[in-house]
Image: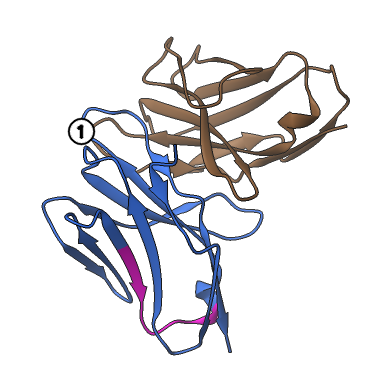
Chain colours: A brown, B blue
Amino acid sequence: NAGVTQTPKFRVLKTGQSMTLLCAQDMNHEYMYWYRQDPGMGLRLIHYSVGEGTTAKGEVPDGYNVSRLKKQNFLLGLESAAPSQTSVYFCASRLDGTDTQYFGPGTRLTVL
Amino acid sequence: DQQVKQNSPSLSVQEGRISILNCDYTNSMFDYFLWYKKYPAEGPTFLISISSIKDKNEDGRFTVFLNKSAKHLSLHIVPSQPGDSAVYFCAASSFGNEKLTFGTGTRLTIIP
């Protein structure tokens, strides 16, 4: 099992550009999450999904969109990137009925 | 409002001694608590958890203590090893809530 994988690992964008981050999990987990990690802020939830075809807002959803067309994939989109979105993004997944989330390796995004 | 607080951003401990990482929470609905460990350039990995029906859970060198009346939990690592140098996040959830609330993390450095 690969667990949770994230693509790409690094990306540099210019202000106003768009991009999509891909998260994939092969553990058949129902729940998937997108977080951002910033210095001194811990992990903050952007959006999450409780199952295929569903999405919900987290703590810091503004400027991001998500889609969960397939159970194993959760996409995070930035339509018009801003320097404030410079961060490390982590995807996680969880099996229904459990509390433990399993994280991917992260994507380091820099917006110039 | 930070519902899960890790008031010590950093901690240095001599190899072989005990490391104690602390976490406080404000939401009395939280009933499950987790500790995650994060190395640089990697995603957080699950370390140990505790349910609110217990006051202690042990796994090898790692023990988590929960004091519900004080809304406080701590992670004890004994003996500390150089490989324990990492950032440790405390997280909490409540029954029926799909989300985890994370603290801001404590950077533990083990001094050889």
Question: Horizontal placement of A15 versus B63: left or right?
Answer: right
- Please give the chain letter of the residue carrying mark 1: B
Badge 1 marks a residue whose secondary structure is loop
Q: Position of residue B24 (x, y in %)?
A: 34, 55
Residue found at x 38% / y 47%: B91
Question: Horizontal placement of A44 versus B46: left or right?
Answer: right
Residue found at x 38% / y 41%: B3
- Where does the magenta region start and end? B74-82
List the residue tagged with mark 1: B95
Residue found at x 72% / y 35%: A8
Q: Position of residue A26 (x, y in %)?
A: 45, 34
Question: Horizontal placement of A107 versus A68: left or right?
Answer: right
Question: Horizontal placement of B69 versus B34: left or right?
Answer: left
Q: Is residue B82 above or below residue A38?
A: below
Q: Which quadrant: the C terminus of chain A?
A: top right
In terms of image quadrants, where is residue B76?
A: bottom left
Q: Position of residue B1 (x, y in %)?
A: 44, 36
- Residue sitting nearer the eye, B91 or A2: B91
Q: Is residue A91 above or below residue A76?
A: below
Q: Residues within 10 Å of mark 1 (few under 14, many from 20)?
A: few
Q: Position of residue A4 (x, y in %)?
A: 51, 39
Residue found at x 29% / y 74%: B60
Q: Is residue A109 magenta?
A: no
Q: Residue furthest left?
A: B53
